[in-house]
Amino acid sequence: MNIHEFQAKDIFAKCGMAVPPEKVAITPDEARTIAEELGTAVVVKAQVHVGGRGKAGGVKLAKTPQEAYEKAEQILGMDIKGLTANQVLVAQAVDIAHEAYVGIIMDRQTKRAVFMVSAAGGIDIEEVARDTPEKIHKLAVDPFLGLLPNQARMLAFKLYVDPKIAGQAAKILTQLYNSFIESDASLAEINPLVTTPDGQLWAVDGKMNIDDNALFKHKNIEAMRDLEAEEPTEVEAREADLSFVKLDGEIGCVVNGAGLAMATMDMVNYYGGSPANFLDIGGSSNPDKVVAAMNIITSDPKVKAILFNIFGGITRCDDVANGIVTALRRIAEGPGGPLKLPIVIRLTGTNEEEGRRILQKVDLVATDTMADAVQQAIKLGNN
C-alpha cells in the first residue's frame, strides 16, 4: 500500500526525525491560512502516489501567503502522470546547502532490507542510478542484528565529510530503519535529505510503501489508505478478497493461484499477446469471487478476450463453472446486455468433468491445455 508524503513524514517524525512544520490543504484558501500560520516561505507540494512531481510542476515555492494560495490553485486538480492532485502539502521552506538521498528497500534476492545512500540526491536521483551507479552505496542489513551503529556511521560518511553532520546522518539512518521495520514497509526513502547552511539535517520529503500482508497489524496505517488515489478496479477487487493488479494489455486473465497467474501472463506474452491484468481468485470455492472477477475484467474497455485458467485443487472446477455461468447471466440482465467478449476456459482438476458439463449447458467448452487456451484467447482477441 502506498501512502502520501505527509503520512510517511508523520511516521518519520514519530521515530524522532527532524521534519519541517507542515499541514495538508484541499483548497487554496486552506493553503493560504497554513502559510500564514507558519509565518515563513513555504513549499506547496502535490500529494499523489507517483514520483517526478517536481518536474511535472507539482512542487512550487511560495514566499507569501497569497503566493501559497496561487500556487495551490495551480496544483490542485493538476494531472500528474495520470493521477489528479486533490490535496497539497504546505511545508515550511528550508534553505538548502546540500541534498542527499537515503532509502531502504526490501530485497527479495538477499532476503534483507537494503540501504541505498547517495551524496547526489534530489530530483535527478533516477539519472544518477542509471548513469553513475557507483555514486550509490548499498548495505544489506542482517534481519536479526538490525542496523548496527558502526554500519550507520559508515553509511553516513559516504554522504558527508564533516563528522558533526555525519553524526546527525547516522542517527537519521537508524531512525529511518526503525520506521521501516516497525511499519512493515517494503520501501522507505528520504529524497532529499537536506543540509542547511548552518549544518542541520532535515527530511524534507518522504516516501513509504507498506506490505499489504502486514496491514492487519497496523490499523493506523491501514486508515491512511487514499481510495481516491487508487485504481477503482483494484479497490473493488480488494473488497471482494481478490488479488488484482491492472495492466495495459488486452487479454483478461482469471486464474487460481499466484504462481499459475504469473505463468499464465508469461505464456500470454510468449504467444504474442499482452495480459490486461493479474487476477488470482485464490483457493476459495466461492462462485461469487468468479462473478466479481468477471465484473472487474469486463469494466476494462481494453480487454478483447477473457481467459480462465483453473487448476482445481482446493478450488473446485464445478464451482468456478457455476461462477462463470452466474456472471454471464447477471451481465446479460444488466443495461449493456449479453457479454460480447469471447471467453476461453481451461479447467483441470477437482470436479473437472462436472465443471465441463455445467459449461456445455451454456455452449461453453473448456480446453485441455494451458497453451491451447492462451493461443485461442489471443486469436479470438485479435479477431
Image (cartoon, rainbow, N blue to C red):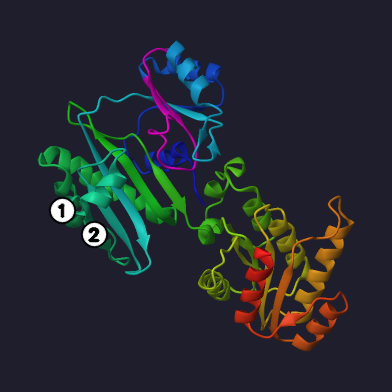
* Residue 85: assigned label: none
| Relative horizontal placement of residue 128, taking residue 356 as reference (left or right) | left
Residue type at numbered disc 1: Met
Q: Which secondary structure, mark 2? A: strand
Q: Which residue is mark 2?
A: 139
The answer to whether residue 351 is seen in the rendering is no
Q: In the picture shown, does residue 112 fall above or below 181?
A: below
Q: Nearer the viewer, residue 204 or 257?
A: 257
Q: Residue at x 84, y 67 (%)?
A: 326
Q: Which residue is mark 1?
A: 154
Q: Residues within 10 Å of mark 2 (few under 14, many from 20)?
A: some
Expressed as whole percent of the image width and height from the top left, the position of residue 148 reads 22, 58
Q: Residue at x 49, y 29 (%)?
A: 88
The answer to whether residue 69 is seen in the rendering is yes
Q: Nearer the viewer, mark 2 or mark 1?
A: 2
Question: Where on the picture, by quarter, is residue 349?
Answer: bottom right
Expressed as whole percent of the image width and height from the top left, the position of residue 76 reads 53, 26
Q: Residue at x 17, y 51 (%)?
A: 153
Residue type at numbered disc 2: Leu
| Relative horizontal placement of residue 18, taking residue 307 as reference (left or right) | left
Q: Which secondary structure, mark 1? A: helix
Asked if marks 2 and 1 touch (Cβ < 8 Å), the reply is yes
Q: In the picture shown, does residue 219 fall above or below 277?
A: above
> Which residues lie in the magenta part?
42-64
Question: Where on the picture, by quarter, is residue 378?
Answer: bottom right
User: Which secondary structure is most common in the magenta stretch?
Assistant: loop
